[in-house]
Image (spheres, helix red, strand yellow):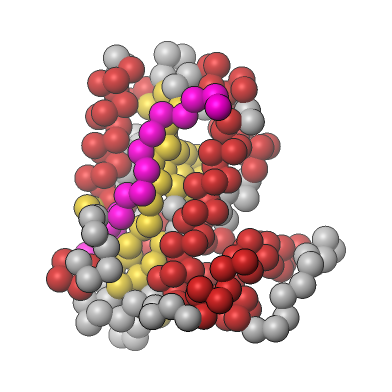
Amino acid sequence: MQKILNQYFAEYKTMSEVAHNAVIEIAHREGIEMNSIIVATSFCFDELNHQASKMNLPAPQGTFIMGGLAGYPFVGEIGLTAFSDHVPDGGAALFIVGPHIGFSRSGEIGKIKRVGQHRHTNTCGALMMVQDHLLSTSIHQIDPADYSMFQPEFLALRLLPRVDEIRNADVPILKTTQFVYDEIEKEILALIQLHPTLLNKFPVYILGGIVINTDENLPNYFSQKTFQKIVFT
C-alpha cells in the first residue's frame, strides 16, 4: 500500500497516529489533560470516515460532526455555536477536517473494496458525482426549494473556477479532492475566526488534510496539510 501512496503523497501517516500526535501536542502546549480536548470532525459522512477501527480518533467522549458531502462544514455558524458548549472548563477544541479519497491495493484511485463486498466501489462517491456534474454543462444557481441538491450544487459552484485544471489533470478526482481541501480549510478558518466568543473561551486548533481510505481492514491514512492554533487575524 505504501508503495502506491508514495507516488501521490509526499507525506502521510495513519489517521490514528496523526490525530493522537496532535492531541498530545495540544495537551503539552496548553498544559491540560488529553481527555479535556474535544474533537470536532468535518469529514464526509461516508462510513469509512467514521469506523473506529479505521480512524481510531482520540475522542473518548465522542466527536462532534460538522461535515456534509465531501467533508465541507455545512453545519456553519449554528453548528459551531452548538459545538462550543461541549468543551470542558479549562479544555481545548481540535477540529480535524478534510475530504477523502480511496486507494485500492491494486492502485485504483477513487475506489476501494469495502468489507463484505467482492467489487470495488467509489470513494468519495459523492465527490465523483459532483465532479461529473462540474464537468458537464449543467451548472446553475442553487434553487432554494430543492434542498436535496443544495450540497452538491454548492460544491460544484465552489469548484467551478478550477474546472479547466480538473479537466486537464492526470488524475481528475485527486485534483478535485485537493481543491475541495482548500475550500474546507478556508471555510473552517473563516467560521472560527468570525466566532469571537469561541476563541475567548478556550484554545482552538485545526488539523487539516486528506483522508486516504484503503481496502477492507487496512487503516485509513492522512496526508496532513496543516496543524495550527487559531488566533484572531
Q: Quadrant of the C terminus?
A: top right
Residue 88 left/right relative to 164: left
Q: Please tell me whether residue 97 is drawn above or below residue 153 in the rendered image.
A: above
Q: Position of residue 80 (x, y in %)?
A: 60, 35
Name the residue rendered at 33%, 17% in the picture.
Answer: 30
Magenta stretch holds residue 218:
yes
Residue 62 left/right relative to 23: right
Residue 80 left/right relative to 145: left
Name the residue rendered at 77%, 72% in the picture.
Answer: 140
Q: Quadrant of residue 26?
A: top left
Given residues 96 and 178, the one toward you in this image is 178
Q: Quadrant of residue 192?
A: top right
Q: Position of residue 213 (x, y in %)?
A: 33, 65
Residue 21 left/right relative to 155: left
Q: Quadrant of the N terminus?
A: bottom left
Name the residue rendered at 67%, 65% in the picture.
Answer: 157
Q: Position of residue 44 (x, y in %)?
A: 49, 58
Q: Which residues are magenta?
A: 217-233
Name the residue rendered at 35%, 38% in the picture.
Answer: 227
Residue 233 visible in rendering: yes
Q: Please tell me whether residue 102 is drawn above or below residue 98 in the rendered image.
A: below
Given residues 58 and 130, the one toward you in this image is 130
Q: Please tell me whether residue 63 is drawn above or below residue 202 in the rendered image.
A: below
Residue 128 visible in rendering: no
